[in-house]
Each structure stands twice: as C-alpha cells, then as structure tokens.
Amino acid sequence: MRPSGRQISDMRPISIETGVTKHAEGSCLIKCGDTHVLCTASIEDRPPPFLRNTGQGWVTAEYGMLPRATNTRTRREAASGKQSGRTQEIQRLIGRSLRAGIDRLALGERQITVDCDVIQADGGTRCASITGGWVALRLAVNKLLKAGLVTSDPILDHVAAVSCGIYAGQPVLDLDYAEDSEAGTDGNFILTGHGRLIEVQMSAEGATFSREEMNQLLDLAEAGTAQLIEAQKAAI
Amino acid sequence: MRPSGRQISDMRPISIETGVTKHAEGSCLIKCGDTHVLCTASIEDRPPPFLRNTGQGWVTAEYGMLPRATNTRTRREAASGKQSGRTQEIQRLIGRSLRAGIDRLALGERQITVDCDVIQADGGTRCASITGGWVALRLAVNKLLKAGLVTSDPILDHVAAVSCGIYAGQPVLDLDYAEDSEAGTDGNFILTGHGRLIEVQMSAEGATFSREEMNQLLDLAEAGTAQLIEAQKAAI
Amino acid sequence: MRPSGRQISDMRPISIETGVTKHAEGSCLIKCGDTHVLCTASIEDRPPPFLRNTGQGWVTAEYGMLPRATNTRTRREAASGKQSGRTQEIQRLIGRSLRAGIDRLALGERQITVDCDVIQADGGTRCASITGGWVALRLAVNKLLKAGLVTSDPILDHVAAVSCGIYAGQPVLDLDYAEDSEAGTDGNFILTGHGRLIEVQMSAEGATFSREEMNQLLDLAEAGTAQLIEAQKAAI
Amino acid sequence: MRPSGRQISDMRPISIETGVTKHAEGSCLIKCGDTHVLCTASIEDRPPPFLRNTGQGWVTAEYGMLPRATNTRTRREAASGKQSGRTQEIQRLIGRSLRAGIDRLALGERQITVDCDVIQADGGTRCASITGGWVALRLAVNKLLKAGLVTSDPILDHVAAVSCGIYAGQPVLDLDYAEDSEAGTDGNFILTGHGRLIEVQMSAEGATFSREEMNQLLDLAEAGTAQLIEAQKAAI
Amino acid sequence: MRPSGRQISDMRPISIETGVTKHAEGSCLIKCGDTHVLCTASIEDRPPPFLRNTGQGWVTAEYGMLPRATNTRTRREAASGKQSGRTQEIQRLIGRSLRAGIDRLALGERQITVDCDVIQADGGTRCASITGGWVALRLAVNKLLKAGLVTSDPILDHVAAVSCGIYAGQPVLDLDYAEDSEAGTDGNFILTGHGRLIEVQMSAEGATFSREEMNQLLDLAEAGTAQLIEAQKAAI
Amino acid sequence: MRPSGRQISDMRPISIETGVTKHAEGSCLIKCGDTHVLCTASIEDRPPPFLRNTGQGWVTAEYGMLPRATNTRTRREAASGKQSGRTQEIQRLIGRSLRAGIDRLALGERQITVDCDVIQADGGTRCASITGGWVALRLAVNKLLKAGLVTSDPILDHVAAVSCGIYAGQPVLDLDYAEDSEAGTDGNFILTGHGRLIEVQMSAEGATFSREEMNQLLDLAEAGTAQLIEAQKAAI
C-alpha cells in the first residue's frame, strides 16, 4: 500500500558516515533512504553576544538545500537574496532540538554551529538534519573533551527525529516525498535517547485528526527514533 | 501560584469586538487578557497564481507586531528590511490553521488575506491571532454569502487556538508572558468547533516532557478552546 | 459642496484617548474623523551615537500603516522588504516637527521614539500622526519629570498639524481622502501652540497656485491647528 | 556677513551647458556656484503601466550624488543596497515639480526620465537639479517635436527652484553649504516662468518662523527664480 | 619545495564520479585533491527571455560554497542576503567558459543550469567547477540526444580549467590552498579538448610578472588541462 | 575596416584633466575617445579593520555608471538595490590593479578609495577607470607627501590599462563599443610603467583563440599602455 512497498512501521534504510569533511570539528553524511544530508559542526570560541559573561554556551543550526536536491530545480536562496520562511522555520527547529539535549553551562562560553545541507531530498529532510546534526555535534564535543577544553560532558542525551503521518487513512512511519505530498496529517517527532519528548509538531491542512490518531503516530515515532538512536550509536 | 493568581485551568478574560475598521470586509479586535490583536480579512477577486483555473480559493495570513506592543520597544520589521523567522513561522501557522477550516472549492477562485496585527502583547499572540482571525474570516465570508457571490458556506467549522505549558512543574492553561518566558515546555493547540485537532506544537527548550504531560496539556487545551469558541459564537 | 457636507473651515471631529497601551511611556489613539492613528512614545536611556557626550537628547519618529487601513489592502512594508519613499518622507517630517518643539539639552542624553501606526486611513494621516505623536511625547516626558530624571521641562510648546488644500477651486480645511485625491494643490501646515510656523509644505501636481491662495490656506491652517491644540490640552 | 561675501539677495553665478553627453535625448551640466549637477533626459516609448491606454505620458526623476561630491566621502548608495530617505524625498520632489510644468496628454503615451547626478555639492543640489532637469526635459521634448512624434508642445512653462533661508537671523537667497548647515529655517521654492507657485517647502528644526519671515523668503525666491529662468532661456 | 611535496608540474589526484544525485539530468562529484565540488546540470524547456524566438539555447552556472567547506566557517550567503562579488565573478566565469564549448543553435530553445557546490575547499574551486561542470553538462546533453529532443550534438569540445601560479618564485601547476594564499601571481586557464584557449586570467597583487613567466604558466596549464580532459573522457 | 576608421594599432584620443572637483584629495576626468570617466581619490585616516596595527595601508576602488552613460538608459543600481555582478567584478579589478603599484607599508595605516564614475560610455570603461584612477591616486599621494604625512613615496610605478580584441578576425587595439560588442575574443591588459604585467584577462564567448593570437594582443597592449602612461605623465 505504501508507494515504496514498505510496511506501515518500516523505516527507510539508515546510514551515517562520519568524518566526511576534513575541516569541520564534527561531520557526517546521513542517508535516510534517498534523503541525504551533510551535517557539520563548527566550534567558535565565543558565545553569541547575549551570553557573554554568563558562563553558558550556545548551539545553533543553519539549513540549506542544494538547488538540485529536489525533483525540479529550486532557486538558490543566496541568489534570491533571502532564506525562505520554510528554511528559517526548519533551522530554528533544528537548533531548538539540539539545545534540548545540551547542558549549556557544561559547554562553557562557546558556540557550536551545526550546518545541515541537503544534498538530495526525498522527504523528511528536517528530521534527518536533526538526527545527523546530533552526530556532528557529538563528534565536535568529543574533540573539546579530548582537548580538555571541556571537562564534564555537556551532551545530556541522544536527540533524534522522525516524521510520521496519516497516508491513505493509515498512520505510517518515516514518510518519503511521495507520501508526504499526499498525507492528510503529518508530524515531526523529536525524542531523546530515553524516549522523552523534545518537540511534537502535528499539522493538518486537509483533514483534521483525533487524539487517537495522534497517539498512534506517537507510538510509531517512539519505535522509529529508537532505531535512529541505534544508528547514531553505531556511527560514533 | 500563577503570577496572575489564576487557577491552573483558568483562561484570561476574552473579548471580541467586531466591525472595528470601516474598510475591511471582516474585522475584529480580540483581547485575551492584555494581549490585543486587530484582525482584518480582505477579499481579493483572484486566487494566487498556482490556483488559477482550478475552481479553488485560498486563505492566507500575515502577522505583525506594533513596535511598542512589547515591554521594551522592538525594531519595526519594515525598517529592518525583513520579517523575522519568528514572524514568518507564525503567519504560516495562522494561514495553515484557518485553511483547515475552509472548503476551498466552495470558496471559489478568490483569496482572503487575514492580517493579524498585535496592538499589545502579553503572551499567546499567535493563538489570539488564530481565534480572532477566524472571526474576521467568518464575517468576510458572510459578506460573500449575502452578496450571493458564494452560494454554499465554505466555512466548515470554528477554528480556535490556545497555548498551554508546564509552568513551575505544573500544566497550566492559557500562558501569559510572565509564564511563557519561564515555562519549561509550552505548546500551541489549534482545534475545531467539534474538538478535532488541526495543529499541535509542543516544544521543550530546557526540560523535556513525557506523553502523560502532553496528554494533560491537551486536556487543558480542549477545555480552553471550547470557551474561545463560545466567545466566537457570541461575537458573530 | 464638500463630499462630507462640511463647511469650508470645518475640521472633522477630533478625539484623543490617552493611555491606550500598557507598555509605552506615553500613548494615545487620535481620531480625526475616520483617520485613526495609534501613537506611542518609547524612552531609551541612550541617545543615538552622534549625540554621545554632547549632553543632548533626540526625538525620532517612525510611521506605518496597517495593511487594511486603506480602502483596498496595501502590501505590508515588512513583507516587501523596505519602507516606501512615502513612508520615509512622512516619518522624517514627523520627527523633524516634534524636535522643533523640544529643548534637546533639557531632555538630556536619551532618545524618545514616537511610533505612529495608522489603524484606519481617511486622509491626513501624517498630520494626525504629528498631533497625536506630540501627545504621546508629552506624556512620556511627564514621566521623566515625575521620576526626577529630567528637571526642567524640555517641551517648549505644543506642536500640531493640519492639511489644507484647494478642492474644486476653493480653499478648504482638513482634507479627507475624497478631497485629498481630487485637490489640485494641497499642503501640510505644522504650527506651535503660539501660532509660529514649524513646517509648511505646499505642492501642486496639476494646478499651480498663487501667493494669495497660499495665504488663504495658511489662514485656515492657523484656525485648524488652534482647535487641535485645544484637543491636546483637553487630553493631557 | 554671508560666508561667501554675497549680499542678502545675491544668487551665486549660474551656468548651464547643454548637450554634454552624446547618448541622452536632452542633457545639461548646471553649475550654481560650486554645486554642479549633470542632468539627462531619457525618452522611453512606453508610459508606466498605470497609464497604459490613457493617452497620457509621464515624467519621472532620479537623483544621485557621486560619493566624493561632498566634503568627506559619502557611502555609495548602490553599495549600501538602498537609496536613503533623503534621496527618495528629493527625487520625488524633482519629478513632481517637473510634472507640474507638463501637459501629459500632449506628451502622449511615453515616459521621460530625468536623471540628476550631483558631481560636486555645495548646498542647493535639489534646486539645481530641478532647474537643470527642466532644461534637459525641454531639449528632449524639442527632439520629439522636431521628429513630429509630438505635435503640440507639452511644456506649459519654465520650472525653476531656489533655496532661501534665515541665516544669522536674516533672510538670504540661494543658500550655499556653509549657510545651509547653520540656517535656523530653510526652504525650497519651485516656481513657473510666470511666477506661479509649484511647491513651497519651509522647515524649522531649531527656530520656528513667522508668516512675515515666510513672506520675505518668498520675495527672495521670486527674484531668484526669475534669474534662473533667464539662464534657462539663454541656454536653450 | 611545494607544501604537498608535489613536483612543479604535478597535478593533484583527479577523480570524477558521475550520477551522484538521482534528480539531476547530469551530475558528478569532482575531486581535485582535497577540493571536492558537486556539479549538477538541470534542463529547463524554456530559454531565458532574451532568447525567445531566436532558436538558440543558453547555458548558465551558479556557484556556492557550503559554510564549512573552508578551514574556518564562512557565513552562509543565503543568510547574509546576497552573493558576494567573488561568488558572482566565479559563476559568471563558469557560465562563460561552458558556453564557449556549446553550439547554442544546436541546443535549441532551452536552458541548462549548471550548479557547482563546493563541499570541501582546498584551492582551485572555480577550476574544478568548470571541469566537473562540463561533465554534468555533457551527461545532460546526452539525455537530450537519447530522447531525440536534440538531433545534432551541441557540445563542440571538452572544456577544462586549471590554476597555475608563481609560488616561491617558481611557476607551479594546480595550486592548492597553501600555495594559492602565498602565490605572488596566479592565474586560471580554461582550454578546450583541442588546446584552444577560452579564458586566461592572470593576476598579480604583490609581484608583477613578465611575459616569459606568463608563457611558462601557459605551458603548465596546457599539460594540466590535457590530464583533466583524459579524466573527463574516462568518466563519461 | 574598423567602424571608427582607425588603424589596427591606433588608440583613441586620450585626454586627462586633473583637479576637476574641489573636495577630493585627487581627481581627474579621463577621456578615451567617447568614454569619459570621473576619477576621485579619497583619503581616510584609518585602514580597513583587517589591517589595524599592521603598519600597512590599503587602496580600494568603487565603480559606477550614470544611468544615461549608455546608449539606452540603464537602471540605477542604487534603485535596484544592489551592484550587479559586472560592477563588482570591475571594481575588484580596479582595486587589485592599483594595489599592485603601491607599497602598502610606505603608505602607512590609511585607506585611499578611488571612485570611478562613468559619465559617458563607449567601450573600455574599466580600462579608462584604471588609467584615470591611477592619476587620482598619484595626486592624492602627492598631497600626503607634501604634508609630510608620508615620507617615502608609496607609488612604485605607473599603472595603465587597455582593452584589445579580435574584431572581424583581426587583432585590434583599444576597442570601442561598436567593436567590443562584435569581438569574438577580447581582453583587458594592465601594465606598469616598466612594461611588467599586472593583470591579463582574455575571454572568448563565441570563438576560442590561439596562443599566437594572444601574443599579438599582448604586443598591441604593450604599445597602447605606453601611450597611456605618456598621457599620465603629461597630466601630473
């Protein structure tokens, strides 16, 4: 019934390759099926201005899409002179989610910027960015620990994200583009390694949904993020 | 325990005054406590380009904040040359929510733009914008019906929104600014007149949350939006 | 002969309601007929950079129009990415006019920003902004005086503005939109409480004008601003 | 008493050289003392969109300042990404003034753009732009007449502009930069060849002014523009 | 003597992997040592407006750099709101170079956009973009030929580019970043498969150069581009 | 054979008038045939931030074109909100070329900005800007020397530029617009007073070129820049 032939609770194949660029303090290329995102984490010695002299650090994120990551070419945001509302919404979400898994006092007065650039898109790019972004962040923090610049691990827990939705009347896990563009309701679920919730975003443009459906999607998301966290563990 | 002295499940006083500007096809000034939003609905005879010759209409929204709606003056977005990511995120949410309550074929090839301008802010401005925006939309559609330009009512149901969050460890309804800025977890809940869910957005920056807490917030939100819908009914 | 039935030297009804927002140091809602402008004055402790260490303060103004303040919806300037030439011209005029009534040394090294946001437009919005902006400024300065932050009153005099023009060949006072869009010559006149001139702007796009006509318009403006100043006195 | 040693009612030397660029349909280099402005008029066969099929034409103006036209280098507006409020205000004034001297029906459905670029500035650049811009416009219209593209002369009258102000307590004609930066009140006066008024802009930032002073400035302006119009006649 | 230990006329290892994204009509990942560029070619059915009804097509290029392609993070151009002068200069060069190898009439009225996105930078990114961009273009044109949409091959010849410079007083081939940042003179050389010149750009910021040195660099460039063209042939 | 009737190796008449604006530290109006460029050099006491405390100075350039410098009016860059890629490319070239003729340590910690504004264009505007810009720079540096602010002359040599190209199959010197728009290959050559090369930019959009042709163009350029340098010597 799913265009890909997957079962309702099947994730797409997950692959996380680390150390893919020589410059970044942390990096990985995450593939969730045909969605490929390059994630890098860059450490800066200074926190943003609003945190000076607070002892706290910051984690922020930026998101981009190569023009031909999509089925038809999308205009380059640098050429159109601004980031779209969608891009800004996504990068705010990534940053917020990653910060929820960080002890900012333990990080100290520095900033880590996680860049998530979509090389190829097939649905779920913001979720892949969060899951892969966490790996890049983990690796960058490992460098700080190794160098003795940070003494207590500021990473509180894993952070992973998956999208679920109601496709053809049925709750399904890990929407690809074909499903995403047809789903009545879809949602993004960001969870920790211990299954706590960081962010839940469910949205209906055509068909409204019930609390029961919401709970079914959450059940799927819990199972999906558990698999993503296994993949994170294997990668680092 | 709440700064305002309210009980956990108390809404702030709601007031919706309609017909507040002479030019707009529909308008209201909604007050949720000290949060005041002016909502207008403007009808245009043509749909956006991507809907030409589809028989369908569109509802979209824009959101703004007067510079001194806030405790300290905020820079005017027109002067800074762009809408912030937060503004874009909010206006996309308002538009998506209102469209979920509309039959776009019944609306026909026209566009209704709902402008939500915050005159005074005290938390929950995006929720007040949705609740008040729906009233402005309802009034504008009434005009179309009365003029015979639309024959079957395109409004499917009421749409109302409320924010809830975990403040001082306790789930509370209808956060004001004092609570919002301290809440570990907060969420926006958009529901229909029949209690169906349109959008759920829950987010934790400091403290993650459990499914049980999420369900408590949803219980509060169901009760809160029911009261908002009563106020909508009284206003129109 | 005037579309509104007014006599040549009739002002529209004036109403000035103060204290309309809880955050601003000074605020009012001014109504000149169907033109409604919300004016707020915000005090900042620091002067603009070019006045540091001069002992002088500054008064500046910003002007905006809600999208549906007008008969047909106007594009939101924040969305189009810049303030129009018209907007900039108006806010420069408001700031210049208000500064003409201020002793900047007495004000001391601080800045007061007067925001004038048009809620509903029916001609004469820049004049209403000046007249109402002065009230907001007066109230904010009163706060400084009361708090002892300023010891000698920096307000030198009232400032009020009215538009006059030649409509259907006849000089008339306080143009509304129907007149404004048809007037051959129109002008804005900004005067003090003692009837001194601060700014005179007369402009002919279609029909040029004589010095005699100019003097007739000035006579009307003197009478009109006197009434506006009475309304200011009543309001504060 | 004037820094330049001029009498109160002395204009600076005026020179208007025509035909200074080979491409433009009309052009001149106007020098009012040390203020030098290059004015070109460019004819386009189509009117702006809002005049299509109305039989009417349009005259518009743009204004610029070379970065080192001023005493210290000014940032290039093309580099800073936008025209300042001052620039926009000036070019709106130039366009409005020139249109007041044109019969737009006689011009027919075409647009003439008058570019005024300040090569060297010493006060009064907007006035020199109007006076020189009119010459460029006149020459371009002559070309249309000669080519038979326009049969009845659309130029109704000369248009010229001069600034006057109250310097050291005394009304003076044709302010240079040294006077302009010290004047309590200054004004721009745009008149026709027959002495009719097109635009009067008087403004006081420091010292307010009386109607009597206003009349003195107007007397000076009438005398000054008469001399400018003689120079225009000599040039064409 | 070279930081990398290479001989004066040694190229870095070249690798060109094709078909790296599933959406683009042509794509490759080119690696010139540690410089990695992802090149995609996107076909659009319509030519740019200035070529409508001329029978001719167009090839254009865009260039970008991921923020952490560089040693320290570079600000994202989409976030800063514009493409830098350097970016625009590079993408104009890529487009011009690729067009020099195309018969635009044979291509017909369509446009091919070549996007070159630098994943990792170590000097010579614009040259790698041209060499890799040609491969993506070749593959996209092959698709058009296979589909019968184009009947005669519009590709006239290979196009490849290499940078050479005078490093430590010595002409060297294929500068890496360590050399590039120290070179007194450096140049980019774009040649065809038959060794004809398309573009020569030599530039001295510190040390000027002689015609003899220029000829030495050209000799190196001829040898280097010959190797790049072999790599192109092997890849397709 | 050349549209202007010139011989293959004929330059257009060159004229360099110095001291053309009263404000700039150095200035000239250079005319290369019908290409007229106003060049000014402005001294600032502070170097750009990246050179603070290095003892070195900087020379930078900006380039602009008056809207009607061209045959048909070009849109004003200040109005369109950004400098085109072409403008940025040109001003980067001018700055780079002038810096190649400067000893930045001898200049000391200051910045000289050379503004090149094209009053009338007929091909070769960037070359005229470099040749004229050098004269303005020379004059400004003379002022520093005379004032004793700089003790050892930071100007190392003359810098001059000329364009050559292959027009109708024939290498020709100093392209005018009629030739430039038809040339298969064209190039810009920037040389010192001693005939050393600073920058060579050759480009083929339609027809590729051989090394022999490149050498012929260089021969022409050497002869042409020698004449330009004579004109520079005569002017200062």
Image (spheres, coloured by chain):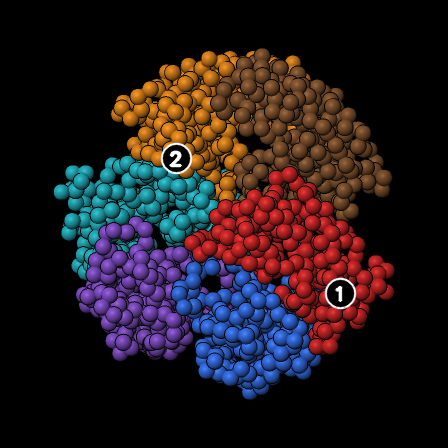
Chain colours: A cyan, B purple, C blue, D red, E orange, F brown
Q: Is residue F176 above or below residue D88?
A: above
Disc 2 on helix, strand or loop?
A: loop
User: To which quarter of the image does residue D54 belong?
Assistant: bottom left
Position of residue A227 measured from the top left corner of the image (x, y, whole percent):
25, 42
**Quarter of the image holding residue C140?**
bottom right
Classify D26 as above or below D215. above
Q: Which residue is mark 1?
A: D223
The front one of B53 and F71 is F71
Query: Chain letter of disc 1?
Result: D
Instruction: Kindly identify the amino acid type of the residue bearing the numbered disc 1.
Output: Ala
**B189, above or below A46, in the image:** below
Q: Position of residue B167 (x, y in %)?
A: 36, 67
Horizontal and vertical percent position of residue F160: 70, 27
In the shown orientation, is residue E184 left or right of residue E52? right
Location of residue A5 in the rendering, given as x and y in whole percent from the top left corner:
16, 38
B195 vs C16, nearest the viewer: C16
Is the same chain shared between marks 1 and 2? no
Q: Which mark is residue C126?
A: none
Foreground disc of the pair 1, 2: 1
The residue drawn where x is 50% and y is 66% is: C64
Residue occupying image coordinates x 74% and y 52% = D234
D236 with respect to C93 (left or right): right
Q: Residue at x 46, y 20 (%)?
A: E160
Q: Pointer 1 and pointer 2: residues touching (CB < 8 Å)?
A: no
Residue E52, numbered label: 2
